Image (cartoon, coloured by chain):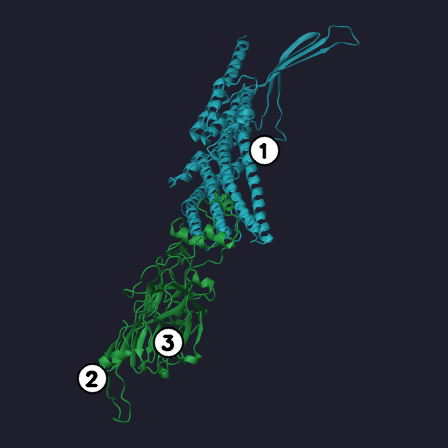
């Protein structure tokens, strides 16, 4: 009959049309393009790396990056190529793609049969055959695919967000390595000055000019300084290993060297007029929340469409109890008690909740952008103050101390003390540089669309700056 | 100039005629007529104030009129060390006031300081209202005002003048000067007459104003407000009778002034001349705070003779006392330990203080601006490790003039030098 030819055709059309909207590369190219636009870095997915088929071009690229002095940009690029957790994140796109694929697939028809062999009489067995499929899938599939497509977009945004987060983490880790190296150097200078004081005390004691208690006091400062130096060495190791983790390095690859100096601070910050607007426009978190509301709206559409009649089973049955009987079969849940009112209310409420969250997030992003900007400005001024005023003053004080020492007005201990305070000022300058670069990175990430890890740090309040309570760090 | 009083009287009397006697304005015949104001050269030989001057005067209707201007002065203690001090007539200390017993003197005092002041005439007998104690005997002289002091000189000897208002501050900043009243009919003559004011200051290296709050840790000790090597030498010819008048207005310290090669005989105090039987002789004259001493000697040994306070810390400039005891410390090892940290470091004081001055003098080390080494100057043989309250009395057979004659040229064989091998052998000295 004509029907028997048309139905399979319609069937096939629906099946193939579902497949056409699922991207083959699981949206990876979209994600990679988005990442490059936002951050300027290229990421790569090597799905067959575990099977031993690493992309040789990428392997070579990685070796080039690790070859000479490791800069911050090189470190970020290496992480995007080699960080294994990032590769896991990219693989999750495949999972999301599978969900999208699944949403477009109709449920298989169900074939059932029953053979009844007579036990009391002797005749041919009774046969029952049935074949049924979910008729409404034809109509509901597009709606469900729309929901899945929106979910898929969410997944892509999540991946982008994680990649950006990784770039931020790598930058911070890189600064930590540089800072640890510079602080170790300065802590070494402090230990050297403590040693100088101790040796002077020892020589004075040898000449009979100093009490034992005074010599032991100097010695105790020196021994403490040595402990501080050991700690500073451990800080270097910690920061290096953290960066190794982020870059996915082990074995001989961990022997990279950095320049040992933080990048020079800009004398003037670039004025970004519409930074708040830019932060909102670029925000992945906001885009994600928006996409989530979209998903929930589409899901509400599905709930609405399937409220009264969620399922309709249509099929053909044939039985032979002596002679064959063939006929259609229908089945559906009768909406007597449950008319889907709860499901609809639930979907509406969840949607409203997500909408409220979206607006709340918008306000948080705006506040975060203003805080990040303020923090950056303050950190910048602080670092400049150290560089241009505090450290040069300490240099001056040391020079004056040397002239007073030459005039025999102060002794060697006071002279060394002045030098030690000069070195401490240098350490505080390095710390301020770290704060500055941290604030800079957070601000940049915010403009690229990522809220910084753990939120934006609150600026230090005035009361915290009182000399008695400050501990020379944070 | 060496002119005897007797000669002057004999030649002068005829020239001046009756102007020696000026009739007094009071009832004729009942009062002794006031003597004419004493004139330098004729009535007295002016005293020499090393590094200083005498206050000029004019005669107005028989009264000797002086003008002292109290003002802030940028004063040099020695080349390389100067400070803002308070003095008179552009000088620190003020010019020496000289007059003759019997003079009627009138001193105008103009106050150009920002603080009120007064002048007390130390040791001088005068009407109470002229005594100069601010608040007690007179209103203080406000900034801008000019007061007039007037009294008859009724004594002779060595005295002083100084501020008597907020003395701790004003005297610590230099407001003082010597006063010499010559006798009208001198019975003794001297060939050289010098006046030296002793004082002490606290000036931290790198600063340029004395600290008047200092009570015990003074670091600049001066003769006539100069510290060695800024002190001018005293000169004398062999055989001269030399008088050195010393006044001490230090804030807190007496000074035993020691003289080399000669004994000093104290011939007067600020109470007046001592009768010969009461004069005593010693090598160090203790000049207490607030006193003057006249010491005389016959310059019978030629040479460069040191004259200085014998307190060892008073013959050093700007000594720091926060310096640890570095004596005997292994300097080479200490330098090695400290130089990696401070490249310009140089251990000092390990063999005493002597090299400090030479290093600074040679420019090896940078010192705070406006400060001088603690000790000395180059001498004819070696660096002289003295500073502070130290000067030199140069006695020569013949002096061309009153200027510094340079270093003494010792006769052969009279200089202590390295013992020769023969001498050691001859006297059985094993080294």
Q: Nearer the viewer, residue B332 or B202?
A: B332
Can residue B349 be seen in this snapshot? no
Q: Give the foreground label among 2 and 3.
A: 2
Q: The disc numbered 1 marks a residue on which chain? A: A
Q: CA distance from mark 3 to mark 1?
A: 120 Å
Q: Secondary structure at mark 2?
A: helix
User: Mark 2 to mark 3: distance in Å?
Assistant: 32 Å
User: Which residue is nearer to you in this view: B421 or A139?
Assistant: B421
**Quadrant of the image occupied by residue B229:** bottom left
Look at the picture and state if B413 lies above or below A139: below
As helix, strand or loop, the secondary structure at mark 1 comes to helix
* Mark 1 crowdedness (10 Å alpha carbons): few <14, some 14-19, many ≥20: some
Residue to which mark 2 is pinned? B17
Q: Which residue position holds label 1?
A: A341
Colour-to-chain, green: B
Mark earlier in primary sequence (2, 3) = 2
Residue A450 appearing in the image: yes
Nearer the observer, B329 or B166: B329
Note whether B54 is above or below A81 in the view shown: below
Residue B384: % across, % down = 41, 57
Residue at 41 percent of width and 51 percent of height: B359
- Judge whether A228 appears above or below A288 on screen: below
| Location of residue B187 in the rendering, given as x and y in whole percent from the top left corner | 33, 80
Does residue B174 sit above or below A254 in this rendering? below
Chain ID, mark 2: B
């Amino acid at each position: 009959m004509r029907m028997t030819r048309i139905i399979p055709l319609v069937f096939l059309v629906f099946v193939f049309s579902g497949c056409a909207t699922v991207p083959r590369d699981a949206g990876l190219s979209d994600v990679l393009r988005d990442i490059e636009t936002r951050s300027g870095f290229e990421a790569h997915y090597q799905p067959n790396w575990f099977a031993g088929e690493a992309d040789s071009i990428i392997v070579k690229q990685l070796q080039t990056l690790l070859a000479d002095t490791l800069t911050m940009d090189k470190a970020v690029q290496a992480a995007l190529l080699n960080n294994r957790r990032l590769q896991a994140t990219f693989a999750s796109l495949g999972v999301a793609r599978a969900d999208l694929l699944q949403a477009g697939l109709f449920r298989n028809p169900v074939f059932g049969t029953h053979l009844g062999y007579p036990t009391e009489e002797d005749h041919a067995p009774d046969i029952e055959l049935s074949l049924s499929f979910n008729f409404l899938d034809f109509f509901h599939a597009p709606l469900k695919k729309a929901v899945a497509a929106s979910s898929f977009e969410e997944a892509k945004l999540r991946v982008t967000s994680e990649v950006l987060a990784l770039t931020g983490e790598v930058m911070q880790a890189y600064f930590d390595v540089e800072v640890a190296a510079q602080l170790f150097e300065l802590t070494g200078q402090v230990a050297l000055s403590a040693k100088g004081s101790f040796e002077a005390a020892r020589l004075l004691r040898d000449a009979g000019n100093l009490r034992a208690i005074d010599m032991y006091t100097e010695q105790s400062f020196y021994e403490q300084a040595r402990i501080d130096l050991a700690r500073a060495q451990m800080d270097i190791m910690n920061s290096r290993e953290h960066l190794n983790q982020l870059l996915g390095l082990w074995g001989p690859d961990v022997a990279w060297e950095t320049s040992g100096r933080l990048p020079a601070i800009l004398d003037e910050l670039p004025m970004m007029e519409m930074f708040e607007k830019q932060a909102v426009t670029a925000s992945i978190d906001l885009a994600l929340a928006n996409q989530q509301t979209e998903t929930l709206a589409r899901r509400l559409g599905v709930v609405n469409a399937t409220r009264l009649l969620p399922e309709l089973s249509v099929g053909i049955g044939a039985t032979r109890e002596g002679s064959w009987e063939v006929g259609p079969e229908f089945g559906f849940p009768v909406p007597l008690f449950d008319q889907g009112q709860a499901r609809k209310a639930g979907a509406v409420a969840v949607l409203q909740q997500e909408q409220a969250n979206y607006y709340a997030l918008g306000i948080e992003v705006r506040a975060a952008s203003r805080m990040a900007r303020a923090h950056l400005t303050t950190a910048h001024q602080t670092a400049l103050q150290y560089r241009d005023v505090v450290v040069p003053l300490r240099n001056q004080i040391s020079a004056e101390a040397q002239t007073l020492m030459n005039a025999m007005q102060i002794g060697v201990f006071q002279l060394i003390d002045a030098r030690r305070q000069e070195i401490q000022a240098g350490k505080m300058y390095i710390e301020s540089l770290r704060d500055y670069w941290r604030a800079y990175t957070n601000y940049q990430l915010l403009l690229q669309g990522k809220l910084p890890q753990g939120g934006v740090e609150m600026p230090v309040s005035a009361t915290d700056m009182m000399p008695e309570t400050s501990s020379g760090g944070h | 100039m060496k002119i005897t009083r007797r000669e002057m009287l004999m030649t002068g009397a005829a020239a001046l005629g009756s102007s020696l006697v000026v009739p007094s304005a009071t009832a004729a015949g009942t009062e002794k007529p006031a003597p004419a104001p004493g004139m330098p050269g004729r009535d007295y030989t002016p005293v020499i104030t090393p590094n200083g001057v005498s206050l000029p005067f004019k005669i107005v209707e028989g009264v000797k009129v002086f003008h002292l201007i109290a003002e802030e002065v940028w004063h040099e203690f020695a080349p390389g060390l100067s400070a803002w001090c308070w003095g008179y007539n552009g000088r620190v200390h003020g010019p020496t006031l000289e007059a003759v017993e019997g003079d009627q003197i009138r001193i105008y005092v103009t106050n150009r300081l920002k603080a009120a002041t007064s002048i007390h005439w130390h040791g001088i007998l005068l009407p109470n209202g002229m005594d100069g104690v601010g608040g007690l005997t007179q209103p203080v002289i406000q900034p801008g005002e000019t007061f007039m002091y007037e009294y008859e000189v009724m004594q002779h000897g060595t005295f002083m003048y100084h501020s008597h208002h907020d003395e701790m501050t004003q005297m610590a900043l230099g407001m003082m000067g010597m006063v010499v009243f010559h006798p009208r009919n001198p019975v003794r003559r001297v060939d050289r007459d010098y006046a030296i004011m002793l004082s002490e200051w606290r000036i931290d290296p790198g600063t340029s104003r004395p600290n008047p709050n200092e009570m015990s840790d003074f670091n600049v000790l001066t003769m006539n407000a100069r510290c060695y090597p800024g002190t001018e030498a005293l000169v004398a010819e062999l055989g001269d009778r030399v008088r050195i008048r010393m006044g001490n207005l230090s804030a807190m310290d007496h000074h035993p002034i020691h003289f080399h090669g000669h004994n000093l005989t104290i011939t007067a105090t600020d109470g007046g001349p001592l009768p010969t039987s009461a004069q005593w002789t010693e090598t160090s004259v203790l000049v207490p705070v607030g006193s003057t001493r006249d010491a005389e000697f016959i310059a019978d040994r030629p040479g460069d003779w040191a004259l200085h306070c014998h307190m060892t810390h008073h013959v050093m400039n700007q000594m720091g006392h926060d310096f640890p005891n570095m004596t005997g410390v292994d300097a080479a090892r200490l330098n090695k330990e400290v130089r990696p940290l401070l490249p310009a470091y140089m251990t000092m004081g390990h063999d005493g203080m002597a090299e400090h001055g030479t290093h600074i003098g040679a420019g090896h080390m940078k010192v705070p601006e406006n400060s001088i080494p603690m000790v000395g100057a180059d001498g004819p043989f070696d660096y002289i490790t003295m500073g502070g309250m130290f000067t030199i009395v140069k006695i020569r057979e013949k002096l061309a003039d009153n200027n510094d004659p340079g270093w003494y040229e010792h006769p052969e064989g009279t200089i202590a030098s390295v013992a020769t091998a023969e001498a050691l052998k001859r006297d059985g000295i094993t080294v």
